Image (cartoon, helix red, strand yellow):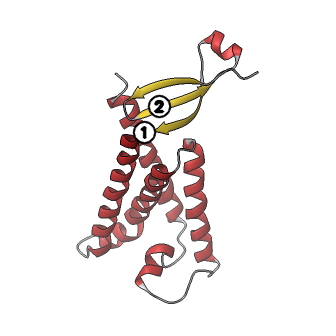
Amino acid sequence: MLQPTITLTLCRYCTILGVATEKWQQDGLNKLIVVKQTAGGRRRYIFSALICLLAGLVIFVYRGPGWVVLRYYVGDVIAVAFLYFGLSAMWNGPVLARIGAITAIAVAIEFAQLLKLTPKDDSLITEIIFGSSFDPIDFLAYAIGLIAAYASEWWFLSKRHSA
């Protein structure tokens, strides 16, 4: 049987809500459900998304040494991190749900490229949103981007403000 919600404030920006059963309470454990953001916490996600957007724009226009790797692989890492932070700024859902949503979007776009279901108009916006061609290495880039985004979120919330 579920007990009333337990609230644990990590910092002035973030509150973790937990629901615990009697057994979990006896063991001193709480099941983490969702991160409830205050306005300051939301601003941090927006700021992180803007940093990713700026990095993505720099990568997009850069044409120096190594630009192909930057454009096609590091750009994918930055793109999913941007989507993760953007979604996190709007939705207080559980971390795994946010990661799952971004993974589903990225994988759907990649398979649409494989099946040639992406728009064919060759515009800059279409290429930015849907990419240009299927590449299985993109899946690794997506995983790295999501892990990096989650790790930065975890580090910021648990290391800097939990003391």
Q: Left or right: where does residue 119 sit relative to residue 61?
A: right
Q: Indicate whether 118 appears above or below 31.
A: below
Q: Is residue 155 visible?
A: yes
Amino acid found under the numbered disc labelled 1: Thr
Q: Quadrant of residue 77?
A: bottom left
Q: Is residue 144 visible?
A: no
Q: Quadrant of the C terminus?
A: top left
Question: 63 or 109, which is in the foreground?
Answer: 109
Q: Indicate whether 102 appears above or below 23.
A: below
From the image, tell me which residue sits under label 1.
38
Question: 143 or 10, which is in the foreground?
Answer: 10
**Disc on res. 15:** 2
Q: Left or right: where does residue 25 sit relative to residue 39?
A: right
- Asked if the residue under mark 2 is in contact with the one under mark 1, i.e. CB atoms within 8 Å, the reply is yes
- The crowding category of the residue bearing disc 1, from other C-alpha atoms within 10 Å (few below 14, some 14 to 19, many at least 20), is few
> Residue 53: horizontal and vertical position, in percent?
35, 63
Residue at 41% from the left image edge and 83% from the top image edge: 124
> Residue 135: horizontal and vertical position, in percent?
52, 71
Residue at 53% from the left image edge and 49% from the top image edge: 91
Q: Closer to the camera: disc 1 or disc 2?
A: 1
Residue at 36% from the left image edge and 31% from the top image edge: 12
Label 1 element class:
loop
- The crowding category of the residue bearing disc 2, from other C-alpha atoms within 10 Å (few below 14, some 14 to 19, many at least 20), is some
Q: Left or right: where does residue 136 sit relative to residue 44?
A: right
Label 2 element class:
strand
Numbered label tally: 2
